[in-house]
Image (tube, rainbow, N blue to C red):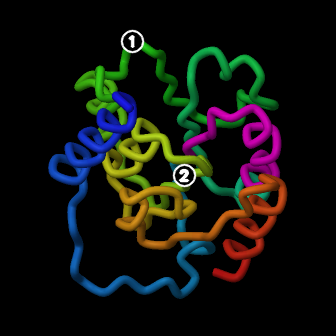
Amino acid sequence: MFESIKAKIAAGVVKKRFIRKNFSPVSFNNFSKDAINYFVILPENDEDFRNCFHIIKYLFEKGKNITLFISEPRYSIVPEKEKFKVVSFNIQQMTKLRIPDSSLRDRIAKRSYDVILNLNRFDDVFLNSVVFVANATYRVGFKNSEISEYLNLQFPMDKNSSKISYENLLNSLKMF
């Protein structure tokens, strides 16, 4: 019970402090093809982590500059990690409400990206808040919480299979 209350408070803090509401119209015409710099938030779930790499491989093959946001323990298992820029984090960089601390927020906000791609399928306040700390034109991810309602482009997920969810996301990105 305490965790759910803490999550609701954290979601409120994220909405109030980090979400910039943009009421100007956004064109999705070729946004994926025209975008060069991608900030990809990798999931913490083991199965999702393994299944999401075909999306990253596709972006790399298209010549995109990819920055991965990943926890330090997972960094060692990223295949071909030398091809990507990395922003890593550790558990000490989370506040008690599970939002990024100021040093991590500053590191994330240093650069601008064309697209932020949140590959996390489950409701995680920390990873969802990172989407809104980073500067980007487009924010893309799965519909998984009330915070995700503020993404520019949301994709439904298959609760039973991460592989299907990531294949659907990849096919959708190919359309744009």
Residue 129 is tagged as none
How far apart are the two marked residues, 2 and 1, measured between alpha carbons? Answer: 21 Å
Residue 149, image x and y in percent? 39, 67
Residue 1, image x and y in percent? 38, 32
* Residue behind mark 2: 118
* Residue behind mark 1: 92
Check disc 1 and report its element: helix, strand or loop.
helix
Instruction: Give the quarter of the image for residue 104.
Output: top left
Residue 51 located within the stretch drawn in magenta: yes
Amino acid, disc 2: Asn
Residue 88, image x and y in percent? 51, 24
Task: Name the magenta segment's main secondary structure.
Answer: helix
Amino acid, disc 1: Gln
Magenta part of the protein: which range?
A: 40-57
The crowd level at tag 1 (other Cα within 10 Å; few <14, some 14-19, many 20+) is few
Q: Residue furthest front?
A: 1
Q: Residue furthest left?
A: 16
